[in-house]
Image (spheres, rainbow, N blue to C red):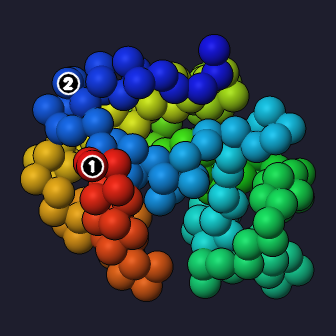
Amino acid sequence: MKTLTEQDYIIAAHELGCEVAAIKAVAEVESLNGGFQADGKPKILFERHKFHEFTFGKYSAMNSDISNPKPGGYTGNEYVRLDKAAKLDRNAALKSSSWGKFQIMGFNHNLVGFPVLQDFINAMYKSEGEQLKAFVQFIKRNKLDDELRDKKWADFARVYNGRNYHINEYDKKMAAAYKKYSK
């Protein structure tokens, strides 16, 4: 089964020592709850600033839509951007995308238990259960379980979404989503 069950959330929450509502809040904010698009591919966001970083800007002059020191440029069909970048540097393109229900960046593949990048990508395609396992590992390895347990959303978002988390109000969105799920 591709989608998570309530039991999956309960097991993950127990492993992290937090509430199910906290995990659901992160999932909602990161991917509007779904780990997959209608066509069966995992949801992604291609981060052009990461591609720029991983390729040392060598494609930026001719391809600023996919390689740019500034974040953004999202089109609504991120696979078009990913495919374009992959034709230039596949490894950098896959590492520059966030994947699945919890939007784990490809460059974190080793951190979340996948020494081989392609194994991480395959897992993201397999199921939301695999996406949840990667999330749990990310939380543990970054020692974010306390922030999740204590609902310290700003501290959580600073690590999870980056130092500019406040621009997209990730902390406020997670707090609101948590409130909804904890009822």
Q: Nearer the viewer, mark 2 or mark 1?
A: 1
User: Is residue 68 at all visible to an observer of this figure?
Assistant: yes
Q: Say which residue appears at 23% left-offset and 64% top-offset.
A: 153
Q: Residues within 10 Å of mark 2 (few under 14, many from 20)?
A: few
Q: Which mark is residue 34?
A: none
Look at mark 1 in the image and give the residue it sits on. Answer: 183
Calculate the distance from the C-alpha at mark 2 to the C-alpha at mark 1: 19 Å
Q: Say which residue appears at 23% left-offset and 70% top-offset.
A: 154
Q: Say which residue appears at 80% left-offset and 66% top-offset.
A: 76
Front one among 68 and 121 = 121
Q: Earlier in the sequence, mark 2 or mark 1?
A: 2
Front one among 140 and 67 = 140
Look at mark 2 in the image and give the residue it sits on. Answer: 14
Q: Position of residue 53 (x, y in %)?
A: 58, 68
Looking at the picture, does residue 124 appear above or below residue 88?
above
Looking at the picture, does residue 124 appear above or below residue 55?
above
Q: Position of residue 91 (x, y in %)?
A: 69, 44
Do callouts 2 and 1 mark residues in contact (Cβ within 8 Å)? no
Query: Secondary structure under badge 2?
Result: helix
- Rendered image quadrant of residue 50: bottom right
Say whether residue 150 is left or right of residue 119: left
